[in-house]
Image (spheres, rainbow, N blue to C red):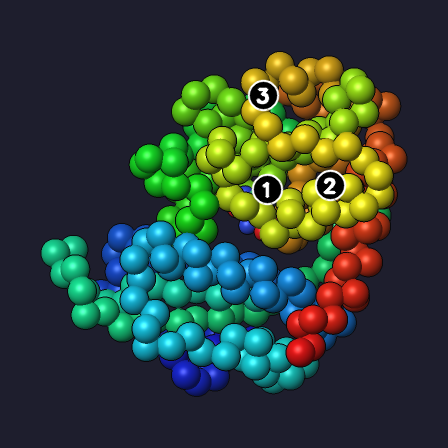
Amino acid sequence: MIFYLQGGYVPQEEARVSVLDRGFLFGDSIYEAIRSVDGKPVFYRDHLARLHHSAELLGFDLTGGTPDLRAIMRELLRRNGIEDSRMRIVVTRGTGGRDQISGFTPTWVVTIEPFATLPDEEYERGVAAVLVSVARTGVASLNPEIKSSNLLNNILARQEAVRKGAAEGVMLNPDGLLAEGAYSNLFWVDAAGILRTPSLEVGILPGVTRQKVIVAARAAGLAVAEDTAGPEALESAREILLTSTSWEVIPVTRWNGAVVGSGRRGEIAAMLRDRLRALYHEDEEDDA
Ligand code: PMP
């Protein structure tokens, strides 16, 4: 594959950064994973806004300018001859030692890989998820709003989930409230039929898919509540869903080893995935 690196396009094998890059040394780096569907990057503005939010929270100096990422992504699609992809924009603070506090030149990288969603049968069957013992980092330590490439917290959570035979691990925040998955946001449908999701105040990544799903659900006439809940709320859930750029809206049909609802995908999960996928094509503002 051809990647973007610091102003140029290079074959994957030649795309290298310095061992003195602070992304490599300290995980001092941020990223966005963004998909293209039918040759068009989707929800580009949302991802770009979140990238800038991450940069601001970490004090990255982007005054030197942000490359035209939309043009870069289109060029990567063209050069690699693919339409459906997952691209990863990575920005590191730049090279420098631990004691350096200013004067950095950020490193910009965009990688690309072909991407296809899971087969429909897997969406029908759903995935298993478990509560993990690893807590989501607290807002006061490493604010989960920062989409940092330091994913150690998420890696530990996913490892624990996989050890327990699940596809995803759900983390609590340091106060014991439901937060999010290792790489996904969490929703559930309660006994009254209300779609619930942890609020941003709990300390979670503001998922682009999460936001689209909230808006789509309200447009479909569903009541949506963003608030706080303990893990017991999931035990009586009719449906549990995980959302992410890669998974879209995937049902959790086994929670901590117990069957959720009918054990198959519920109708709200199916409806929300359809509505989300429709937005990939309606998102014409990105052509501006
Ligand atoms: N939470 C975490 C911790 C994640 O890593 C991800 C995936 N980037 C998400 C939620 C889902 O976010 P998005 O819908 O923007 O992909």
Give the residue at mark 2: 250
The residue that appears at 81% across and 35% down in the rendered structure is: 222
Q: Is mark 3 within 8 Å of ligand 1?
A: no
Q: Residue 251: horizontal and vertical position, in percent?
A: 75, 36
Q: Residue 276: horizontal and vertical position, in percent?
A: 77, 52
Asked whether the beta carbons under mark 1 and mark 2 sit within 8 Å of each other, the answer is yes
Q: Earlier in the sequence, mark 3 or mark 2?
A: 3
Q: Amino acid at mark 2?
A: Ile
Q: Residue 136: horizontal and vertical position, in percent?
A: 44, 32
Q: Is mark 1 within 8 Å of ligand 1?
A: yes
Give the residue at mark 3: 229
Quarter-of-image position of residue 67: bottom left
Q: Secondary structure at mark 1?
A: loop
The residue that appears at 52% across and 75% down in the rendered structure is: 69
Q: Secondary structure at mark 2?
A: strand
Q: 244 above or below 223? A: below
Q: 138 above or below 262? A: below
| Count of marks placed on residues | 3
Whether residue 17 is visible = no
Give the residue at mark 1: 184
- From the image, state whether disc 3 or disc 1 is nearer to you: 3
The residue that appears at 16% across and 55% down in the rendered structure is: 98
Q: Residues within 10 Å of mark 3 (few under 14, many from 20)?
A: some
Compute the Cα span from label 3 to label 2.
21 Å
Looking at this view, name the residue that lies furthest to the left. Answer: 99
Q: 14 above or below 33? A: below
Q: Amino acid at mark 1?
A: Ser
Q: Residues within 10 Å of mark 1 (few under 14, many from 20)?
A: many
The residue that appears at 83% across and 50% down in the rendered structure is: 274
- Which mark, residue 72? none
Q: Residue 115: horizontal and vertical position, in percent?
A: 68, 62
* Viewer-nearest residue: 239 or 120: 239
